[in-house]
Structures are given as C-alpha cells and as structure tokens.
Image (cartoon, rainbow, N blue to C red):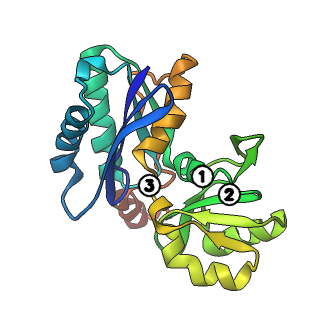
Amino acid sequence: MIVLSVDSSSNSATVALVANKSVIGEINITDKKQHSEVLMTMIDSALKLCGLTIDQIDGYVVSKGPGSFTGLRIGMATIKGLSLGSNKPTVSVSNLDGLAYNVITHKGLICPIMDALRGNVYTSFYENSNGELKRLTDYMILSIDELITRCIEDNRPVIFVGDGTEKHRSTIESALKNSVFAPPHLNYARASTLGLIGINLLEEGICDEVDAAPFYLRKSQAEREYDKKMGLE
C-alpha cells in the first residue's frame, strides 16, 4: 500500500509518501506563504520526485486537528478532493498523536503540547506500551498550570514535544525537574509520522466517512467574540 499524507494545521506545511510502512519521500515547509498556495505544488513535487503518479496512491492520510482552523480546512478539503476523485479511502489522524509518535521511544509519560493561546495548550497523555503508542487521556485543552499539576500527579519522567514547548519551557522546567524536551525538528507533526500511523489504520480497514470534519477543541475567534457579545461566556 502507498499512502499520501498531508498536514497543514500549523505554521508548517508537510507532505509525505509512505509505502509498506516505510517513508519514501517527504517535503516540509515552514514559511509565511499561505498553505493554500503551496500544498498542491508540494504534493505534485513529492509525487514526481518519488517517481509516482496520483493513480498509484492507494489511500490518503490527513491531520484532523487540533490546530489552525483555516489550515485544517485547507488540508482536509485538499485530501477529500483527491480521495473522492480517485475513489480511494482517507483516514484522519490527530496531530497530537503524530507529535507523541515522534518521541515514542521515551520511557515515561509522553506529553505533546500545542499552543492554544491565553496560557492554554492542546494536549493528551501517552506512553510507550510494548513498542506501541498508547493514548491515556482524551484530547484536552488545559492551562499550563493544570497540565503541570497532572504531570506531577503522574509522577513519571515526562517528555514534552510540540510548538507549545518554546513558549512554556521555562515554566515547565521550574515546576517539573524530571522533564525533558524533544529537539526542535520533532516539534511539529510531520506528514511522514501521520502517514505511518494512518497506513496501519487503512490496512485494518479503518477510514473516514465522507462528511468527516476537523476537530478543534475550542471555538473559533469569531465564535468566541459572538458569545461574549451575546453574554454567553
């Protein structure tokens, strides 16, 4: 099986091709350009560089969030179009899962954190269970203080990974002496990582329904402003 994997949920746009559970090609761009302007070009380039055509793709993997509202919609719309046009299955994977998978060899608590603004982070807790990534909690949005409290209660060495580490590292380090941090190149959910997770799901027959949508964990800025105006928050 050959899958095309895409993530455009953050500042990085990333495209990868995974075949037989091995990464055969990947393109990553972190730039000020709009993902809508570069994503299809990246897909086309990845296919050409790997000597493949779109007809040879057996399935698709895409990030379902959390992350940028606009970025998630761009990625999912692009992959849905390719999937429907070729009648090939798609599966969406949380980029929190992807971030955790980046550091799966850690012996202890694995904690991906993505910046959710206002002192909050998107997160979930994981561990390595006999070489497999095991998610221990729901996907959550927590204040950094709540996150630290939960890590203290777990009482295991913890590794943090994701774009939230840069913003909150000093706070975490001062509160959690047994914490370590992933290197910068692992702090975004690479399309190759999502592809490796997704290809296993597709081979098990797990795929999205046509009307699958991103999950955001929080309302958009426009929705929050409307709720505030209407006295709903």
Residue at image position (54%, 36%) is 197
| Amino acid on which disc 1 is placed | Ala
Alpha carbons under labels 2 and 3: distance apart:
26 Å
* Label of residue 219 in the image: 3
Is the residue marked by circle 2 packed among few (<14), some (14-19), or many (20+) residues within 10 Å?
many
The image quadrant that residue 49 belongs to is: top left
The image shows residue 59 at horizontal and vertical percentages of: 39, 22
Residue at image position (44%, 55%) is 219
Residue at image position (49%, 75%) is 166
Q: Earlier in the sequence, mark 2 or mark 3?
A: 2
Instruction: From the viewer's side, name the closer residue of 13 and 120.
Output: 13
Where 230 falls versus 199 (above or below)? below
Mark 1: which secondary structure? Answer: helix
Quarter of the image with the N terminus in it? top left
| Amino acid on which disc 2 is placed | Ile
The image quadrant that residue 223 belongs to is: bottom left
The image shows residue 151 at horizontal and vertical percentages of: 75, 67
As drawn, is 154 to the left or to the right of 115?
right
Where 146 falls versus 17 (above or below)? below
Q: In this figure, what is the number of numbered marks?
A: 3
- Closest to the camera, between mark 2 and mark 3, is 2
As drawn, is 30 to the left or to the right of 100?
left
Q: Earlier in the sequence, mark 2 or mark 1?
A: 1
Please say whether residue 41 is visible from this viewpoint: yes
Alpha carbons under labels 2 and 1: distance apart:
6 Å
Name the residue that disc number 2 marks. Answer: 110
The image shows residue 30 at horizontal and vertical percentages of: 29, 61
Name the residue that disc number 1 marks. Answer: 100
Is the residue marked by circle 1 packed among few (<14), some (14-19), or many (20+) residues within 10 Å?
many
As drawn, is 180 to the left or to the right of 217?
right
| Amino acid on which disc 3 is placed | Lys
- Asked whether disc 2 touches disc 1, contact meaning CB atoms under 8 Å apart, the reply is yes
